Image (cartoon, helix red, strand yellow):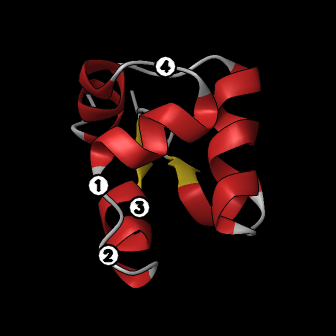
Amino acid sequence: MITNRIRELRNAHGQMTQQALAERIGVTRQTVNAIEGDKYSPSLEIAFRIAAVFGVPLEHVFQFTPHRE
């Protein structure tokens, strides 16, 4: 399972809106909303763009927890 800290990072960067983040990474606000809500996993390129906007490593934005069987 992939989770993220996008909302937390947006708030830490001056209350950045989903729309502002979307414009900076080249997607729609709805896409940012879906990624932030863990309803959609971004492509690797978009994930790196998000990390670059916040100036943090990819692992600081996204966390992967394997399913245990």
**Do the CB atoms of the residues marked 1 and 2 lie less than 8 Å apart?**
no
Label 3 vs label 1: CA separation? 14 Å
The answer to which image quadrant residue 22 occupies is top left
**Image point 75% across, 39% down: which residue?**
48
Classed neighbour count for the residue bearing mark 3: other residues with Cα under 10 Å, few (<14), some (14–19), many (≥20)? some
* Residue at mark 2: 11
* Residue at mark 3: 5
Label 2 vs label 3: CA separation? 10 Å
Q: Nearer the viewer, mark 1 or mark 2?
A: 1
Q: Mark 2 or mark 3, which has the lower sequence index?
A: 3
* Residue at mark 1: 17
Q: Mark 4 or mark 2, which has the lower sequence index?
A: 2
Q: Mark 4 or mark 1, which has the lower sequence index?
A: 1
* Residue at mark 4: 27
The answer to which image quadrant residue 40 occupies is top left
Amino acid of disc 1: Thr
Mark 1: secondary structure: loop
Q: Mark 1 or mark 2, which has the lower sequence index?
A: 2
**Image point 41% across, 83% down: which residue?**
12
Amino acid of disc 4: Val
Horizontal and vertical percent for residue 66?
Answer: 51, 37
Horizontal and vertical percent for residue 69?
Answer: 39, 27
**Image point 65% across, 27% down: which residue?**
46
